[in-house]
Image (cartoon, grey):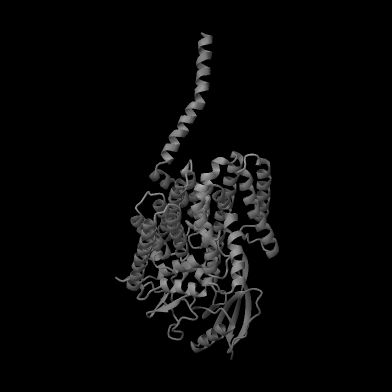
């Protein structure tokens, strides 16, 4: 009897691991269903967004969008006019409190792209900012599914790994949490590239696949100008492979013609929407402005390129360059040695250098990390694996060739105030898909280390967003409570960041230089203002204002630093 009981106990213990394995397989099958996977990621996004203060923003761009939504006309036609209390004195809006506001068809527009805000308007009206944030979250999901599709096209053993890594431990996670169009634009670029690869691999007819890819690139370009670069490079690369390697000249021409037609149709539809809603085209003028500035100030652009590729925002420029270089070279060396079967020791040594460099960066405190490779380590790995493996070279070529063109044409200025090189997101997405496909050839410990590093840097980004939004929200109340007839900010994006409390009736002005400050003081004098408050960087000298005398100074805490508020009173 005892023997039978012991045997049964042994059988139960030996069956336990198999039972656990079967449960794990069942869970994987469930998570392999698109609807279930999408729901899980969406729940994670909502939980992370709940930790942020709804009044605080990632930056001035998202704050400007919130200000637009607050000011949208409630009539039958959406004007997206943010208004201006001093329009009679400053009709061109040169001193408008929301920096970069322009006067279009008699209305004051604070928009860089229309589709995102246009689609968010009904959601905002129904459930406020919390509901409107579903748009970038849906964009994050579409990015993750695009990564899965790209990984499948480069023969990944587990394409779903790319989905989960991009959705939860990449810059996509960060940009899914606030009202920014980056995830939607990236999704359009990603699916456009999927369309090009499908034509090359004969999954789709050349003309039909080209039209679909062009439409995707056009939709993306309505929100992200660099989509034009990635679309052009991807289409040219795909057509080149068809013509030169596959000898399919007709397919090459059909792909190019279809992509151009689809792109033109999408851009035309966006321009018609802008004309109907805003009364004037918006995106075409912005793209033309970017194109006209391309290639200028090459020294600054080289510096911006470095920041968006490897910058860590470490404080001292020399240390930042050294530490960023260490991380990039370490990641490339780790992947190179890991792809060689007899160099695991060297790969682990290089990985240790990367971990030390990243730990040193985190020890300096939470802030934006602007470099693509430090924030998206899989991108560095994908760059090496894309060159090593022939079947992934087309995708790697598109990702890498587009980078210098983006650097030449991207918006120049303040590259450090972003997370993970946002102009290079499409490169990161493609290289991450390649890295996922090539992961099976590397040691398990190194694969685990790459995931842990990606999770750590993404977690630091979420924590920084939480800190930033709470600090900005806490600073709003003392800012709004400043007692003055007119308040002038010399900090360009200050009032854009407080879009959650913006109102056209608030007597605020933004003056970014001494000449503009003089005009603002003259405007205040013309309005018979007796008191003026000037908000500026705390180390700047107090300016002299004609007709006003400095009376008092106070400090204003603002997102990790102090600003100064200078109180002026009209001269007797």
Q: Nearer the viewer, residue 106 or 442?
A: 442
Residue 360 quadrant: bottom right
Residue 256 on image: x %, y %: 39, 61
Viewer can see residue 180: no
Residue 349 quadrant: top right
The residue positioned 47% from the left and 48% from the top of the image is 44
Residue 303 on image: x %, y %: 62, 67
Q: Is residue 528 above or below residue 399?
A: below
Q: Nearer the viewer, residue 92 or 257?
A: 257
Horizontal side, residue 306 vs residue 17: left or right: right
The quarter of the image holding the C terminus is bottom right
Residue 442 quadrant: top right
Residue 80 on image: x %, y %: 38, 71
Q: Is residue 482 above or below residue 247?
A: below
Q: Residue furthest left?
A: 76
Label count reads 0
Viewer can see residue 400: yes
The residue positioned 65% from the left and 54% from the top of the image is 329
Residue 446 on image: x %, y %: 61, 42
Q: Is residue 148 above or below residue 427?
A: above
Q: Nearer the viewer, residue 33 or 180?
A: 33
Q: Is residue 559 above or below residue 242?
A: below
Q: Nearer the viewer, residue 549 or 220?
A: 220
Q: Residue furthest bottom?
A: 572
């Amino acid at each position: 009897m005892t023997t039978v009981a012991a045997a049964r106990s042994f059988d139960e213990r030996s069956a336990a691991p198999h039972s656990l394995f079967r449960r794990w397989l069942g869970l994987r099958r469930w998570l392999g269903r698109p609807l279930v996977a999408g729901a899980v990621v969406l729940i994670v996004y909502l939980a992370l967004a709940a930790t942020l203060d709804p009044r605080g923003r990632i930056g001035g761009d998202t704050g400007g969008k919130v200000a637009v939504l607050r000011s949208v006309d409630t009539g039958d036609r959406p004007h997206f006019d943010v208004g201006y209390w001093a329009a009679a004195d400053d009709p061109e809006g040169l001193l408008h409190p929301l920096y970069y506001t322009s006067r279009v068809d008699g209305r004051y527009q604070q928009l860089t792209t229309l589709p995102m805000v246009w689609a968010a308007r009904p959601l905002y009206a129904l459930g406020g900012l919390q509901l409107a944030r579903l748009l970038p979250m849906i964009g994050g999901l579409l990015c993750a599914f695009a990564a899965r599709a790209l990984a499948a096209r480069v023969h990944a053993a587990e394409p779903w790994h790319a989905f989960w890594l991009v959705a939860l431990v990449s810059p996509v996670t960060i940009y899914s949490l606030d009202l920014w169009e980056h995830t939607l634009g990236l999704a359009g670029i990603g699916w456009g590239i999927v369309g090009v690869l499908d034509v090359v691999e004969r999954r789709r007819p050349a003309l039909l696949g080209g039209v679909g890819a062009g439409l995707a690139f056009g939709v993306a370009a309505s929100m992200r100008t660099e989509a034009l670069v990635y679309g052009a490079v991807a289409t040219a690369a795909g057509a080149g492979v068809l013509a030169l390697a596959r000898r399919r000249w007709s397919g090459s021409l059909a792909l190019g013609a279809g992509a151009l037609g689809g792109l033109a149709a999408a851009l035309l539809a966006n321009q018609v929407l802008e004309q109907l809603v805003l009364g004037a085209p918006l995106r075409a003028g912005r793209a033309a402005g970017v194109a006209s500035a391309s290639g200028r100030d090459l020294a600054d652009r080289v510096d911006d390129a470095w920041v968006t590729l490897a910058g860590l925002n470490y404080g001292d420029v020399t240390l930042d360059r050294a530490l960023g270089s260490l991380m990039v070279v370490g990641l490339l060396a780790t992947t190179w040695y890991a792809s060689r079967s007899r160099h695991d020791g060297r790969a682990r040594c290089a990985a240790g250098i990367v971990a030390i460099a990243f730990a040193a960066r985190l020890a300096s405190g939470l802030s934006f990390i602007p470099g693509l490779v430090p924030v998206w380590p899989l991108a560095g790995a994908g760059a090496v694996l894309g060159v090593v493996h022939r079947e992934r070279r087309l995708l790697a070529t598109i990702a890498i060739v587009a980078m210098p063109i983006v650097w030449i044409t991207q918006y120049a200025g303040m590259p450090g105030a972003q997370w993970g090189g946002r102009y290079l997101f499409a490169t990161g997405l493609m290289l991450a898909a390649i890295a996922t496909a090539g992961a099976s050839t590397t040691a398990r410990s190194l694969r685990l280390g790459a995931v842990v590093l990606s999770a750590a840097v993404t977690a630091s980004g979420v924590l920084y967003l939480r800190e930033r939004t709470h600090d900005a929200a806490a600073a709003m109340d003392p800012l709004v409570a400043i007692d003055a007839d007119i308040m002038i900010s010399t900090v360009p994006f200050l009032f854009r960041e407080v879009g959650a409390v913006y109102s056209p009736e608030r007597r605020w002005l933004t003056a970014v230089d001494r000449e503009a400050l003089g005009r603002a003081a003259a405007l205040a004098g013309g309005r018979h203002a007796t008191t003026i408050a000037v908000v500026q960087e705390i180390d700047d000298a107090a300016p002299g204002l004609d007709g006003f005398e400095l009376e008092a100074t106070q400090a204003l805490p603002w997102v990790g630093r102090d600003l100064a508020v200078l109180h002026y009173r009209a001269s007797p």
